[in-house]
Amino acid sequence: MVRKGPGSAAGRAGAMPGGRALPGAVGALCRAMPPRARLVPEGLRRAKLDRPQATLDFWRLLYALLKQIHGGKWSEADAIDTQIRFVKLALWYQGYGRPELYRLPSDGSAGSRELLLAFSWLLHRISLLEQLLARNRVRTGDETSVCMCEDDLSQSEQGTTEIAPEYGPEDRVDVRYLQWLNGRLRFQWRSLHAQHQEQCKLLHKIHLLTSGSHVDQILGHFSVTEMDLIRQTENYKQLVQLLERETMQLEAFLEWKQLEPVYWQWMETVLDNMAEEGNMCKPQDAHIEKSSLPKVTSCCPWADSLTGQINKLSRDLMALRDQLHELVTHRKSAWEEKVKARAEDLQKEDFAATVRKIQEAVELKLLDLSNLCAPKKNKVHGLCRLVYRSKHSASKIGFSRSVSKQPAPAVSATEVIRELQMREASLQRELKQLREECRQRLDEIAEGLDGVICISP
Amino acid sequence: MLGTQPCEARTPQVPHTGTSPPAPRELRAVGGQGRAVAAGGGRRSGAAPEPLGGAPRAGAALPRISPASYRAWPGRTELGKPGRAGPCCLRAAGGESRPSPKELEELELLNRALEKALRVRKSISKTPLEAQVALAEKPTGEGSAFENASEQQVPVSGRDVPVSREARAVSKKPASMKKPSPYQLRAPYRTDPDVKKTQRRAPARCVSQGPRTAGKSSSKGAVSRQGKSHRPASSASDQGVCAATELQNAPGSSKSALKEQQSSIRDSSGEGNLVAAGRQLIDAGKKSCGSHGESSRKENPTAEGGSTSPRTVTIQQQGCQLKLPHPYRKAYSRNCRAWERSRLCQTSADAAAARKRFTERIQTTFCSPMPALSPVEIEEELKVLQDIPSLLSQYVEAEPADHPTLQREYESLLTLEGLQSTVSQCLRKLQLLQAAVESQKRLHPDCTGDVGSCCPACVPARGRACGGAGTLAVPLLWYSSFQELRDLFALKLQVSMLHQEIALQKLTMTELLPVLESEACPEASAAQLYRAIYTQLCEGGKRFPVLVRDELAD
């Protein structure tokens, strides 16, 4: 039985309209959370009241949730101060700016109300609940990722040197060992490629041959999991249970969506409470606050890495800008001369109209480009379910289900392939540039080598 | 053909693989003329062998090929050659009317190959085929290796690749050919024309068997290795079972199988060594027939029990009639509907207003000069900008230097100017981002421990963007053809590989170039070191520069 928090029962200005709906909302919220998070309505209430044990529990809760969002590995046995540090960093990363939270002690002894506020802020800001649901989704299909975000090694600061064996100054690594390693690496890529192709073949076979058998018309065919399910039904009892549990979670989510205004109002009362208390304590905290401003000089690897990237991009763009500047001034002067020379002819031809048309055309052309410069809001990321739809069946299926409502997000392999090709092209260029640079440096070195001429292949 | 012997006329005629109708007749005719159903045709004279229809047919029952039969053929001085003269089939054998022992042995082998082929064909039942989809055209070396591994399991062993590659290159390996197990040719030796050829898929399997097992002296070993890694049973006959099932299930396909084998053998051998080809067949045949005892056990690598195996056989045929088990179906439908409702569910106006109020209020309590962009937003913006320079360069390079008309020139000029402004915009944005980074750095929560420990906590944020971004639906990725799927996977792999290559390139650059530049190595090996580093850094380890010693003649 969940009692209403005292905040809502107290005679605050204007009775809480949803006084009785709050338990429902909170209950729905808790049920919609992933099971591993272990959030209970009691926990939220205790957090508001700043009960001691509540703080530790809440830190742990936030840790678990944020780790799920960020995709890292975690366990409940992680030390509390590690957990706290992680949560603070993650909140900072998302842009949470309440200084009180960052000042909370790292033994988890106080501050559950702050945590409650942070939790609610996350709920809204990053759609915490939706993300958790999406991430923990029971996967029954053949999934593949369409973006290559995880491959962006430029952001990885992890030291790779610890993997390599340490060689002292006396040991010399034979360069042939490097060559051998390189060869092995290439071979592994090739075999991986072969395996992928094989996997494609088998996937396609299943998709093709089971077309039309699936319950879900839009999908149309089975996935590997479902295929296996047919053959060995006994192994998949758990899958059915997971699906059912997830369905209940989703229903709780829908309930929450209906009842949530009450929750937010409740959270405002928390803010009210804190504001009142804050007013009382403010003079004392003021000087504390000033002294605990983070030192500016501490180095932050994140900032360094980003700065590095920004600098590199700036260099490239500035080089481009100079190149363009030269090109444009040159062309412009040439063009102006030409125009002057033929000024009368052009007037007769109504050149002005032509000019306008050309301007419009160019604007259109460059519009694509500027779209590319802005982050695409609804770019498809992450895992997608592979579905085979032959051209001929696409027309057959029709749009029966999804024509009236919003269509489900879908992306076609053709688009993805195109993007990947662009990506590949730009990566190839980068690689080529790097190699050119190496070549130049090596040419310089070659001149230093006596008695040897190097003829490049 | 038989490269070992200088062009002596050999028994086997190669039936023309391209023509299927004559196939039954081919085999029928073969025996009498000692035709082997093995390719070697590549070596034959340019003219395709006349359809065996042209060759005298020995009638329905073909006696076992024996040297004696050759002598029985009128007017033949060369063995088994019914008057077709290829350049190989020569007169060098001249007046020899007796086959040499080697030839006899080869004849023997060919006979056995034929017997086995016949046996296999006879044992083919009419059950539907449990074969690969016709997408397995000519299997490539690697593909063939995997095909045989298992239907459902993706092979994990990288060894498969070299195995099959080796096999392809091999066929010339006569090596330690094991004596094939003795078989008696059964008469009537005839192919049954009524046995229909259903699909050509089984041959694909069979084919891949052939070249792979051919000629490898350790083929058995390889095969059993294969078997071990992919099947519960580790016997080499697993492969045979595989093949057996294929052949069993493909009525009449064995002749196409054999033809495929011929052509594949022709491909893979490059010299049409007939003996080797015969051995291939024998191996394949042996494997398929030798395990006839187990042929009742249908191929089913992952079957838990007999009850599922009959199902497996027909799954491909009845794929469209399969039904998911009822409890799953129910759970799935409910789940699917719940997801759909959740996806379409929108925040009510009240809720939106309430959220807004709360968020605004709490934001007033944030640190006062709050940076405009949160770290996550900074990273996102930066990610978008990563590709811009190369994209813009492409646009710039696309503008030609000379223009035919004034209009074109103007257009080009405007485009360049537009690009210029884009570049400036991006530069400004970068400046903003830099400022944001600085201000966020100031807010960065201090780590009490050493700085390195807070770094890993930042990094997992990398995985965040790919989490589905809060959308409550798994997007669907449509593909419309097998080729598209393959291209997709191949491209993804390629992009990953390029990422890695670039990272490695940067790393090796910083590590290796200083070594050369510092000249810390002895003179003798400097050149070699240089060469190696050059290869690694400039050619990706694929091609080598040539180093020429610059010695001036005195």
Image (cartoon, rainbow, N blue to C red):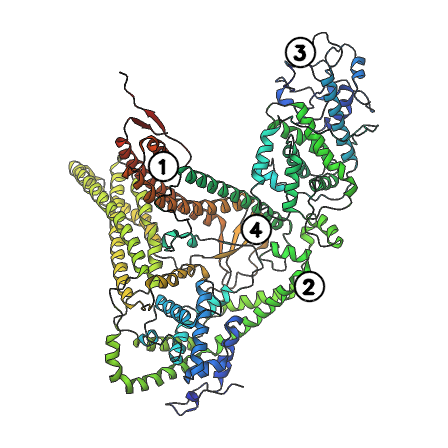
Residue B401 is at least partly visible in this image? yes
Q: Which residue is mark 4?
A: A388
Q: Are marks 2 and 4 in contact (CB under 8 Å)?
A: no
Determine which quarter of the picture holds residue B55. Answer: top right
Marks 3 and 1, how far apart at CA: 56 Å
Q: Chain of mark 2?
A: B
Q: Nearer the viewer, mark 4 or mark 3?
A: 3
Residue B295 rendering spot, x and y as whole percentages: 77, 42
Q: Which residue is mark 2?
A: B326
Viewport quadrant of the C terminus of chain B = top left
Lower sequence index among marks 3 and 2? 3
B290 lies left or right of B528: right
Q: Describe residue B70's horizontal placement relative to residue A75 as left or right.
A: right
Secondary structure type for disc 3: loop
Q: Quadrant of residue B405?
A: top left
Badge 2, how many Cα within 10 Å: few under 14, some, many 20+?
few
Q: Which residue is mark 3?
A: B90
| Callout 4: SS | strand
Distance CA(mark 4)–CA(mark 3): 57 Å
Identified at 68% across, 24% down, the residue is B275
The amino acid type found where label 2 is placed reads His
- Which dot, 1 or 4, sits closer to the camera? 1
Q: Chain of mark 4?
A: A
Q: Nearer the viewer, mark 2 or mark 4?
A: 2
Q: Nearer the viewer, mark 3 or mark 1?
A: 1
